């Protein structure tokens, strides 16, 4: 005779085994379809390089932003160091450490780069940039009560770049004065003939 109770128990065990088997198969398929490589985000160091052989506006502007944006004197050295040759960086640090510049430390603050007109000579790797930036002038250190805020400044600098490996770095930086030839001058024009004849 067939024991009905044992048959029902066997059906129940078979059903449970089938469900467990289906769950295992489903999980296996899920893992098989999931990409096996996980992407991890690691902080990357900014590499200053130019894919082409020419100096680019973006590279120059990145330097200008790093150089002209700072809270106070010396504060942005780590930002602009990567854009300069070792010699240029040491020269800039020495310039910042001069007494005349240290005198104004804490009184001229909050430098913010605004924009620049950038002209690039790609053959000689020389840049002329007319840079506009703002800063805040304080009468007393750390006292913004009587401060002159957002004072607009403009300077023109000439940068010469040196190619080191695949990257361009600032090798020299100097302020320059540009004069328009279309401006009239009070100086006499040599070589012109004067039409007034006096007796």
Image: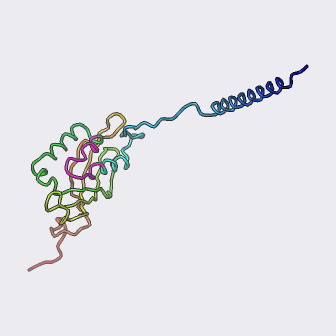
Residue 11 part of the magenta-drawn span = no
* Segment tinted magenta in the rendering: 66-81
Q: Is residue 142 left or right of residue 120?
A: left
Residue 79 part of the magenta-drawn span = yes
In the image, is residue 58 above or below residue 183?
Answer: above
In the foreground, 150 or 162: 150
Colour approach in the figure: rainbow
Q: Is residue 143 left or right of residue 78?
A: left
Q: Residue furthest right?
A: 1
Q: Is residue 106 left or right of residue 60?
A: left
Give the image quarter of residue 123.
Answer: top left
In the image, is residue 82 above or below residue 36?
Answer: below
The residue depicted at 15 percent of the width and 57 percent of the height is 141
Q: Quadrant of the N terminus?
A: top right
x then y, percent, for residue 109:
21, 56
x then y, percent, for residue 22:
72, 30
x then y, percent, for residue 2:
89, 21
In the foreground, 12 or 22: 12
Q: Quadrant of the C terminus?
A: bottom left
The residue depicted at 34 percent of the width and 33 percent of the height is 165
Q: Is residue 125 left or right of residue 34?
A: left
């Amino acid at each position: 005779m067939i024991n009905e109770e044992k048959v029902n128990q066997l059906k129940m065990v078979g059903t449970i085994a089938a469900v467990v088997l289906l769950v295992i198969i489903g999980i296996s398929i899920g893992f098989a379809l999931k990409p096996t490589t996980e992407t991890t985000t690691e902080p990357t160091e900014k590499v200053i390089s130019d894919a082409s052989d020419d100096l680019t506006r973006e590279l120059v502007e990145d330097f200008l932003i790093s150089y002209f944006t700072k809270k106070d004197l010396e504060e942005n050295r780590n930002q602009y160091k990567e854009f300069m040759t070792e010699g240029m960086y040491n020269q800039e640090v020495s310039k910042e450490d001069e007494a005349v510049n240290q005198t104004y430390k804490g009184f001229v603050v909050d430098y913010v780069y605004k924009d620049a007109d950038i002209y690039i000579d790609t053959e000689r790797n020389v840049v002329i940039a007319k840079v506009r930036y703002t800063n805040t002038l304080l009468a007393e250190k750390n006292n913004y009560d009587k401060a002159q805020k957002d004072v607009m400044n403009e300077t023109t600098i000439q940068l010469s770049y040196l190619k080191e490996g695949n990257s361009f770095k600032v090798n020299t930086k100097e302020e320059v004065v540009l004069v328009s030839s279309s401006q009239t001058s009070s100086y006499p024009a040599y070589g012109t003939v004067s039409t007034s004849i006096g007796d």
